[in-house]
Image (cartoon, grey):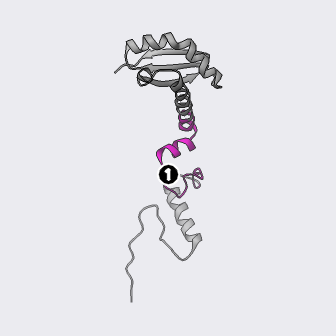
Amino acid sequence: MATSQRPPSPGLTPHDDTDAGAARRKTLAQLRALGYASIPKAPPLVRGRAVSAAQAAIGSGVLGSLWRQAQEAQNCLAQLRSVLPAPLLSQVQSGPIEGGEWTLLVGHSAAAAKIRQWVPALAAHVRSKGWPVERIVVKVQQK
């Protein structure tokens, strides 16, 4: 009784489910066909599990750094809830904190003018909460 086997795809080896070593050899052969010399390293957080885009970004080098900067800026903005009135706070979005300078993005020029009056108090408040903010820059957000 002859069994029909499909020919392997280019760069793939026949599959043998009975041996874990065979599965590893198959994987290595497939990776070599793609140009890899060994199995690429994946962060333990991602390997073999579905994760959210945010978790994958946090585990990445550059994206993780950007994610942490964005989270830091959002946490700093949360400190302003007790200082700014709600109508003004709803107009504010947090920009980056770079070198002791924090950028606040505001929806329109009237709100930006009012927030600029509050800048010394806002900077003192976030510094008292432990944030490394020496200067706050208010910019009108372009739509």
Instruction: State the image coordinates of residue 50 (x, y, percent, origin top left).
Output: 48, 55
> Looking at the image, which residue is at 55% across and 20% down?
102
**Residue 130 relative to residue 27: left or right:** right
Asked whether 101 or 36 is in front, the reply is 101
Q: Is residue 56 magenta?
A: yes
Instruction: State the image coordinates of residue 127 (x, y, percent, origin top left).
Output: 63, 21
Task: Answer above or below: position of 25 versus 55.
Answer: below
Circle 1 sits in a helix, a strand or a loop, which is it? loop
> Looking at the image, which residue is at 48% across and 11% down?
116
Instruction: State the image coordinates of residue 32 (x, y, percent, origin top left).
Output: 53, 56
Magenta part of the protein: which range?
38-67
> Looking at the image, which residue is at 65% across and 22% down?
128
Q: Is residue 50 magenta?
A: yes
Task: Answer above or below: position of 134 versus 90.
Answer: above
Using a 10 Å C-alpha cutoff, classify the residue at mark 1 as few (fewer than 14 neighbours), some (14 to 19) or many (20 or more). Answer: few
Instruction: State the image coordinates of residue 29 (x, y, percent, origin top left).
Output: 52, 61
**Residue 128 relative to residue 6: left or right:** right
- Quarter of the image where one finds residue 21: bottom right
Residue lying at the far left in this picture: please name it.
143
Locate the N terminus by quadrant: bottom left
Asked whether 135 or 35 is in front, the reply is 135
> Looking at the image, which residue is at 51% across and 13% down?
118
Hey, what amino acid is under mark 1?
Answer: Val
Mark 1 sits on what residue? 51
Asked whether 110 or 45 is in front, the reply is 110
Locate the C terminus by quadrant: top left
Q: How many tags in the picture?
A: 1
- Quarter of the image where one finds residue 5: bottom left
- Quarter of the image where one finds residue 114: top left
